Amino acid sequence: MTLQRNLFWFLVAALMAGLILVAPAQPARAQAMSSCQKVMEYVDLDADGQPEALTLACQFTPGAEDRMTLYKQPGSVVPDVPWQQNIAYEEETWVFDHGAQGKASLIIIFRRDGTALVAYLYDDRDQDGKVGYEIDNGRVVVTEGNYWTARVVAPDGWWIRDGVLNYNLYITVDGDVEGMFMAEAYRNRLVTDGRPDYDINFFYRFQI
């Protein structure tokens, strides 16, 4: 299994397990349990004096020095509050830089779809060591390919509420990634082509 696939599935697991997710309502507690520690810089993409992104110092694997940049809609980044409160889990994009090498290792685009929240995950499909993207009018445009590699849906419309993580998730995978029983037997048939290869569903009854 390549480093990119290892990193990809570590971050998928981290997303679901709450190692990256932080609770805006509980910044002190959230910061202690998260993988990101502080803001490195606020980024003003259009030179209007207001930041549209923030870069965090993180550690996604033991001993690593990582970065995560959150790109948000104009006017939605507030530098004067704890950085956790800038995270909304919808209408924003997270760009992960494993090892702080100045390139994307994974990109997650958060969107709302009706009453559900959706996360689209893009990894390195062409094996050139990075996930291709560009910034267009303050928004992240993934150029790695035409299709996401995984989609995570929270049909209840929330990822975290009152400190409780939502494990009712529908995950759809398209392409060659670890996750299926005996995947090695048919890996060469898996292509990220817009036609999902398998689904993973989690169901959990919450008592909040």
Image (spheres, rainbow, N blue to C red):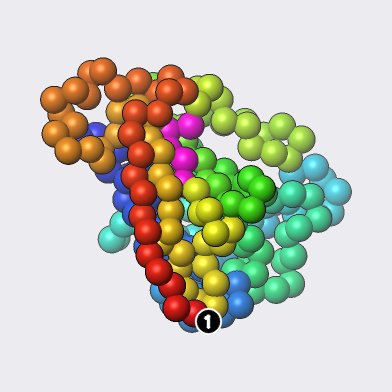
Task: Decide whether the magenta segment is chiefly helix, strand or loop.
Answer: strand
In this picture, which residue range is highlighted in magenta?
148-152
In-image side of 104 versus 91 (left or right)? left
Name which residue lies at 40% across and 28% down. Answer: 196
| Label 1 element class | helix
Q: Position of residue 156 (x, y in %)?
A: 55, 59
* Relative to 173, residue 144 above or below: above
Q: Amino acid at mark 1?
A: Ala
Image-quadrant location for residue 27: bottom right
Q: How many marks?
A: 1
Residue 73 % position (x, y): 74, 49
Name the foreground residue: 26 vs 124: 26
Q: Residue at x 57, y 43 (%)?
A: 109
Tell me, yes or no, if residue 84 can be seen here.
yes
Q: Is residue 65 depicted above or below 34 in this figure?
A: above
The reply, left or right, for residue 36 in relation to residue 42 is left
Residue 23 position, x and y percent, is 54, 72
**Please, is residue 197 above or below residue 157 in the view?**
above
Does residue 151 show up magenta in the picture? Answer: yes
